Image (tube, rainbow, N blue to C red):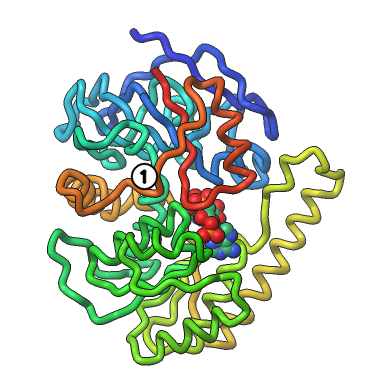
Amino acid sequence: MPTNTAAWINAGGARLEVGPAPYTRPAADQIVVRNHAVAVNPLEWIIQVAGRLAYRWLTYPTVIGSDVAGEVVEVGSAVTRFRVGDRVLGHAVGTDKDANRAAEGGFQHYTVLLERMAAPIPDTLSFADGAVLPLAVSTAACALFQSDQLGLRRPTATPESTGRTLLVWGGSTSVGSNAIQLAVAAGYEVVATASPRNFDYVTSLGASRVFDYNSPAVESEIIAALQDREPAGAVALGETSAAACVRIVGASRGNRFVALATPPVSFAHLGGPDRGRFAVPKLIARLVGANIALQIAARRRGVRTKYIFGTTLKANEVSTLVYRDFLPRALAEGRYRALPKPTVVGHGLGDLQHALDLQRKGVSAAKIVVTLD
Ligand SMILES: NC(=O)c1ccc[n+]([C@@H]2O[C@H](COP(=O)([O-])OP(=O)(O)OC[C@H]3O[C@@H](n4cnc5c(N)ncnc54)[C@H](OP(=O)(O)O)[C@@H]3O)[C@@H](O)[C@H]2O)c1
């Protein structure tokens, strides 16, 4: 049995601590991957600082981490798509309620992955490149393709235009970068928002127009741009995105649906040194208040909204659509790009806390990655 090591969280709010971990063998529909690169997401520091406020089922010690890339070292008895030695990327789901299992977390040397949440990566991509994709592509795919979300047409190698336009608010985020690419591959025109420094980046992903979300005129400009289009709804990414998307979609024709990725209040200060005694109750009160206001605004405009949970695809056909049918060929043929590019900030599990702290301070069209041996 290989010797495993993990970056553990031993209690709610605790910092990562590197220590020994068991090597866990795969179930029939799982593979074990020796990780060579892991990426960090807002989700990971949110789970770290908010603990059971965000993930109330979590048992400690736990191993967080969603994005891994590495080599397959063992396959379950029912696995047909992978062999030992294959280079793969995968979405680790260890902190999900139905898993709640350290062996399935990303921040360790050996991670147990569901076969249907992993994809081969071509030789042209490094492990650091591969690690930027999983949670972001999963979340974008849940928003776009699940029937309880936007329910859009599926991506193909030769997309035919649907004649419809999707709004991606937060096009330079990791999730937005994938939402744009997936929507274009499914035949949708995409209009997006970003800071002006990222306009070229967002256009290079396939968006036809990009608007500055910090401009006071942004909503009226997007409403005007959608006037002669048939809107397909919106994906809302970023703290201020939900209310803006509800107002824009509410003022447009077409699909009156907004897929919500981001709660309207920030968890970032919870992990800071100035966290006061009443930080948690205050946050909950603001969260409830902001969500009620959002629902009232949506109802008044006849707009439906739903929060995305970026792992729900594992229980439906969207996981195989993305990780088996679309992504492997699209990556190999260069039709899909592993973006935003990795910014490698360390090497080894001991650098993961630094990586999380950097992600919490904020990034711009970049994915923070730590490489492992
Ligand atoms: N519900 C889920 O399952 C799920 C899963 C994954 C992510 N998320 C959420 O989705 C959001 C995106 O995640 P991510 O990992 O893709 O983020 P990320 O890459 O860390 O986001 C960084 C980007 O955020 C953009 N940004 C900052 N404030 C914004 C705003 N108010 N409106 C639009 N864009 C803004 C910045 O754009 P500029 O630099 O161009 O200004 C920057 O490029 C986060 O809120 C995250 O918590 C939810």
Alpha-carbon neighbours of circle 1 within 10 Å: few (<14), some, or many (≥20)?
many
Question: Residue 216's spot in the image, x, y percent?
Answer: 62, 79
- Please say whether residue 102 is visible from this viewpoint: yes
Q: Residue at x 47, y 22 (%)?
A: 347
Tag 1 secondary structure: loop
Q: Identity of the amino acid at label 1?
A: Leu
Residue 226, picture quadrant = bottom left
Q: Residue at x 26, y 19 (%)?
A: 73
- Relative to 211, residue 341 above or below: above
Question: Residue 307's spot in the image, x, y percent?
Answer: 51, 63
Question: Residue 51's spot in the image, x, y percent?
Answer: 65, 39
Say which residue label 1 marks.
Answer: 133
Residue 16 placement, left or right of 131: right
- Relative to 73, residue 224 above or below: below
Q: Residue at x 46, y 38 (%)?
A: 343
Q: Residue at x 40, y 15 (%)?
A: 23
Residue 369 placement, left or right of 7: left
